[in-house]
Image (cartoon, rainbow, N blue to C red):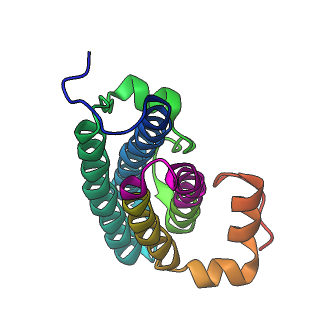
Amino acid sequence: MSVVKSTLFETDLKTVGDALQGALVDLVDLSLVAKQVHWNVVGPRFRSVHLQLDEVVTTARTHSDTVAERASALGVNPDGRASTVASSSAIGTVPEGWIKDEDAVQILVAALGAVTTRMRERIDATGDPDPVTQDILIALTGELEKARLDVPGGERLRSRGVLIRAVRAGAGPGAPSAG
């Protein structure tokens, strides 16, 4: 049952609804992953990594609300329940326990990379059926990509080749590094 009648054609609504739901799931999970790492990060760059994680959480939460409200406005029921997020997210799991600051950076960059890759696919899918939704996805993807560039210590890790290799291979913090 849809309380709101969408102005989109049914096939377009399905495409846009799927894109918005996927974006919501990834943003909710990104906020949870970033907060979990935030609570457990340790090391000499603790403060800068800790603060950056808070910024990512705020960005993800703000945009998840925007995405969910857009879905509702189109008559699509947004689903941010824990079970839905756990079964649908593109983000890997966070290891249990304390997380070294360098590993925290890897986790954050990998999570942001996974989300922005899927967001770009959604941008492509929503262009024709709903440019308004596409604009929302473009704006949030831009902010997530900026956050990925702002990760503290990312330059140092990139110069050692660790980060790029780990992200490309989909490896987590326990993966062998080139350093």
**Which residue occupies 51% across, 32% down?**
88
Spot occupied by residue 12 in the image (x, y as percentages of width and height): 47, 38
| Residue 52 position (above or below residue 32) | below
- In the rendered structure, the answer to whether residue 154 lies left or right of residue 98 reads right
User: Which quadrant is the N terminus positioned in?
Assistant: top left
- In the rendered structure, the answer to whether residue 89 lies left or right of residue 61 reads right
**Which residue occupies 60% across, 52% down?**
121
Spot occupied by residue 63 in the image (x, y as percentages of width and height): 31, 56
Residue extending farthest left: 3
The reply to whether the magenta stretch includes residue 120 is yes
The image quadrant that residue 90 belongs to is top right
User: Which quadrant is the C terminus positioned in?
Assistant: bottom right
**Which residue occupies 39% across, 67% down?**
139
| Residue 24 position (above or below residue 44) | above
Front-most of residues 114 and 166? 114
Spot occupied by residue 68 in the image (x, y as percentages of width and height): 28, 42
- In the rendered structure, the answer to whether residue 173 lies left or right of residue 37 reads right
**Which residue occupies 47% across, 42% down?**
19
Front-most of residues 149 and 96? 149
User: Which region of the structure is painted magenta?
Assistant: 111-133
- What kind of secondary structure does the magenta stretch mostly adopt? helix
